[in-house]
Image (cartoon, helix red, strand yellow):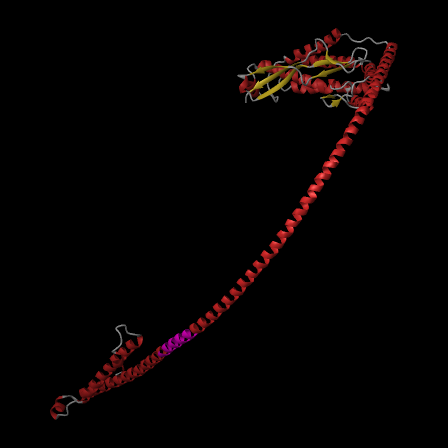
């Protein structure tokens, strides 16, 4: 049978062997059915049995056997067909295995051929590489020889050039030495000539300077005599220092009185917490704060220039003054005063005197200078409102306080106009004053400070006749006072 041919294979069976085993089993079953069918056909023909058996039973038995035989025959044909199909599959598998083995052998043969071809080609490439390398080495050696030869030639050329340069250097050094000697001789001659010329020039300059000083002294004396003559024609009585001091301290006394205003509440920038941090005496600090606030307002709106007190018209006048005489000495407060000289000061005090006559008298609406009068009054009211706005942050301002403030502003305006009519220049200073220190706690631990003006300083430039305008001094008794408070935050 077909199964017998594959018994000699290994223990690991392939699918074809398994199929053959199934076919063998089916065939054996079919043979058994064939033997059964033959035995069924051998029924007895004895007459005794024929008599015993019933005819109907025999017919049924024959029919049953016939049907069984027919089913067996069908099964046998089916199994034979399946066996032939399995045999066909087995043959196909066997053919595939043979083809695979042939492919494997062909691949091995081709691989051996390619290895042989690659080996020969590799040897050929190695030979070519060796030949190329030999050529490159030979070229490199030849290039080295050529480079050495050229280098040697260049060295020889450089040595020849160096020798020539050394010769030229020695020649140049000799020439420089000769030129230096000649130049030293020329310089000696020029120095002797210049010394002689300098002596002559110095003598000439000295004589000219003496002439200039004499002429300048004569001109100064002439100008002073003319100024004195010009001043002598005018009826003018300068203010004495005592009167200046009295007017100045009258304003200071009123400011000190107003600064003692009780703080019923505090809506100012100086909160109670801040005051407690920077001072051990809040009551005294509050007085300092109000003094500084009042003096700052008076300075900005009245004392910063001779004409600011006249309001918007005064700003026009001070601009004309600067345009006519330029700007010189800086005075913080929004205005820069012209440099003090006789012409500038004469223009200033004559103009202030004319303005004084207008603002301190009653004028009608038809007066040519009524605009100046209205500007002056409106400006004083605006100064009052500015200070009142600060006072209202700490107290309900009553009429008595208003009247006191009005008195301060009126006295300050009149005194400042009077100061502006003087031939000397009187200025009020609130910056750079000598200050006393007020600190809370050890001074070395402080990290902040604030300076408050308690009283400004009145200074005079020139003398009472408008002369000596290059000298500046503090009016006796009108020294300023400031408080520098040190604190730690």
Residue 93 shown in magenta = no
Q: Is residue 161 visible?
A: yes
Residue 104 shown in magenta = yes
Q: Is residue 341 left or right of residue 144?
A: right
Quarter of the view holding residue 429:
top right
Residue 261 x, y percent position in the rendering = 63, 13
Quarter of the view holding residue 357:
top right
Residue 461 x, y percent position in the rendering = 76, 14
Labels in figure, total:
0
The residue sitting at 66% across, 47% down in the picture is 163
Q: Quadrant of the C terminus?
A: top right
Q: Quadrant of the N terminus?
A: bottom left
Q: Is residue 313 left or right of residue 49?
A: right
Residue 280 x, y percent position in the rendering = 55, 15
In this orientation, which residue lies closer to the viewer: 379 or 159? 159
From this view, report whether residue 269 is shown above or below residue 98. above
Q: Is residue 462 left or right of residue 483?
A: right
From this view, report whether residue 107 is shown above or below residue 456. below
The residue sitting at 77% across, 7% down in the picture is 240
Instruction: Find the residue positioned furthest to the top.
Output: 242
Chain part drawn in magenta: 98-113
In this orientation, which residue lies closer to the viewer: 385 or 469? 469
In this orientation, which residue lies closer to the viewer: 208 or 117? 208
Q: Is residue 397 visible?
A: no
In this orientation, which residue lies closer to the viewer: 41 or 427? 427
Quarter of the view holding residue 185:
top right
Predominant secondary structure in magenta? Answer: helix
Q: Is residue 449 left or right of residue 110?
A: right
Residue 18 x, y percent position in the rendering = 28, 76
């Amino acid at each position: 049978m077909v199964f017998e041919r594959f018994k000699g294979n290994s223990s690991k069976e392939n699918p074809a062997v398994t199929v053959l085993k199934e076919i063998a089993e089916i065939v054996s079953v079919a043979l058994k059915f064939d033997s059964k069918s033959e035995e069924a056909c051998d029924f007895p023909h004895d007459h005794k049995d024929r008599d015993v058996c019933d005819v109907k039973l025999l017919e049924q038995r024959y029919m049953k056997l016939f049907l069984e035989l027919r089913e067996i025959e069908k099964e046998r044909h089916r199994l034979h067909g399946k066996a032939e199909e399995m045999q066909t599959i087995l043959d196909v598998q066997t053919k595939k295995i043979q083809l695979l083995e042939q492919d494997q052998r062909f691949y091995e043969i081709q691989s051996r051929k390619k290895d042989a071809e690659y080996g020969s080609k590799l040897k050929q490439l190695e030979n070519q590489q060796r030949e190329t390398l030999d050529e490159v080495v030979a070229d490199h050696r030849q290039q080295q020889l050529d480079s050495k030869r050229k280098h040697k030639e260049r060295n020889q050329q450089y040595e020849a050039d160096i020798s020539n340069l050394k010769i030229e250097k020695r020649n140049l050094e000799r020439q420089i030495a000769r030129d230096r000697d000649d130049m030293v001789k020329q310089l000696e001659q020029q120095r002797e000539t210049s010394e002689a010329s300098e002596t002559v020039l110095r003598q000439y300059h000295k004589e000219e300077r003496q002439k200039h000083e004499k002429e300048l002294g004569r001109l100064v004396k002439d100008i002073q005599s003319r100024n004195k003559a010009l001043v002598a024609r005018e009826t003018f009585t300068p203010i004495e220092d005592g009167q200046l001091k009295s007017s100045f301290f009258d304003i200071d006394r009123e400011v000190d009185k107003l600064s003692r205003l009780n703080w019923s509440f505090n809506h100012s920038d100086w909160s109670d917490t801040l005051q407690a941090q920077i001072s051990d005496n809040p009551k005294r600090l509050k007085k300092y704060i109000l003094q500084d606030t009042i003096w700052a307002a008076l300075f900005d709106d009245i004392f910063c220039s001779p004409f600011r007190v006249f309001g918007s018209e005064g700003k026009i006048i001070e601009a004309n003054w600067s345009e006519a005489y330029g700007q010189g000495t800086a005075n913080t407060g929004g205005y820069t005063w012209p440099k003090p000289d006789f012409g500038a000061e004469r223009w200033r005090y004559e103009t202030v005197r004319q303005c004084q006559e207008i603002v301190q008298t009653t004028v009608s609406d038809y007066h040519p200078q009524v605009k100046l009068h209205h500007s002056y009054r409106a400006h004083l009211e605006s100064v009052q409102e500015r200070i009142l706005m600060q006072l209202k942050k700490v107290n309900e301002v009553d009429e008595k306080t208003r009247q006191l403030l009005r008195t301060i502003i009126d006295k300050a305006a009149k005194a400042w106009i009077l100061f502006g009519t003087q031939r000397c220049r009187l200025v009020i200073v609130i910056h750079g004053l000598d200050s006393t220190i007020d600190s809370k706690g050890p001074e070395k631990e402080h990290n902040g400070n604030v300076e408050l003006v308690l009283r400004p300083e009145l200074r005079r430039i020139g003398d009472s006749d408008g002369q000596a305008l290059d000298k500046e001094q503090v009016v006796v008794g009108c020294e300023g006072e400031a408080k520098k408070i040190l604190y730690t935050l």
